[in-house]
């Protein structure tokens, strides 16, 4: 099968599966990660087909929604790719990218072992920084019944995956526990540049948020 045909078939299938998912891990998140991964990948020496497929499948069964089981995503992705006749080697590479790519808490190091994985991780993390990220973070907080903000509850930098999953604090804390940490975790030069600009925007947003909270502007 032509690579472009394969990519568009997988895109259609992922879209059908994720459409209407309300937590911020929906099809349009996947779409943005896919486009960004392609954008970054075009500047790096990578196999773009692997980058695009892994980006499309990276949230097919997000581990956060399966009690911390990070083998579900690679398995579901593998089954889908197999049905489209993709080779075992490529399936294994994509499975590894999915497993290595997700954020598991501030103190948990997750650097992908392949450049393709680094590109997909960068694209996924970039969607967690900036204007859309702010909207996604509040949408996710609402999905989890979290308060928007409580000035008395300070952020905690989680040292383990378990602590990060148990976390129940308000959404503004999530900026400090994840979003604002991401710019320093980018793997590629392209992603670092984009992250820097989006990071500044979030800082300005938080600054306004606190001022409005206290009736200062
Ligand atoms: Ni994602």
Image (cartoon, rainbow, N blue to C red):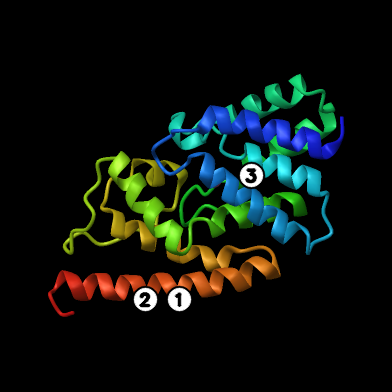
Question: Helix, strand, or loop for circle 1?
Answer: helix
Q: Which residue is mark 3?
A: 100
Q: Which residue is mark 2?
A: 204
- Quarter residue 183 falls in: bottom right
Q: Residue, x 42% and y 41% (percent of image)?
A: 162
Depth order, front residue of 139/160: 139
Q: Which residue is mark 1?
A: 200
Q: Are marks 3 and 1 in contact (CB under 8 Å)?
A: no
Judge the density around disc 2: few (<14), some (14-19), many (≥20) Cα neighbours within 10 Å: few
Question: Helix, strand, or loop for circle 3?
Answer: helix
| Left or right side of 98 for 49 | right
Q: Residue, x 77% and y 23% (percent of image)?
A: 84
Above or below, comparing residue 197 to residue 188 in the picture: below
**Residue 122 percent location from the top left of the image:** 62, 57
Q: CA distance from mark 2 to mark 1?
A: 6 Å
**Residue 164 percent location from the top left of the image:** 40, 47
């Amino acid at each position: 099968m032509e690579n472009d045909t394969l990519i568009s078939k997988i895109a259609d299938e992922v879209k059908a599966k994720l459409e209407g998912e309300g937590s911020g891990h929906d099809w349009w998140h996947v779409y943005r990660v896919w486009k960004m991964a392609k954008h970054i990948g075009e500047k790096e020496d990578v196999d773009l087909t692997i980058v695009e497929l892994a980006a499309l499948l990276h949230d097919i069964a997000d581990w956060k929604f399966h009690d911390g089981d990070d083998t579900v995503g690679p398995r579901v992705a593998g089954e889908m790719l197999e049905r489209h006749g993709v080779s075992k080697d490529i399936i294994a590479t994509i499975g590894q990218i999915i497993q290595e790519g997700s954020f598991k808490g501030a103190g948990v190091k997750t650097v992908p072992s392949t450049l393709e994985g680094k590109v997909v991780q960068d694209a996924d993390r970039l969607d967690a920084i900036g204007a859309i990220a702010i909207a996604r973070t509040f949408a996710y907080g609402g999905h989890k019944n979290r308060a928007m903000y409580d000035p008395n509850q300070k952020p905690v930098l989680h040292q383990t995956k378990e602590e990060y999953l148990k976390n129940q604090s308000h959404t503004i804390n999530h900026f400090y526990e994840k979003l604002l940490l991401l710019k320093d975790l980018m793997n590629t030069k392209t992603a670092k540049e984009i992250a820097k600009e989006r990071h500044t925007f979030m800082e300005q947003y938080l600054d306004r948020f606190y001022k409005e909270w206290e009736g200062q502007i």
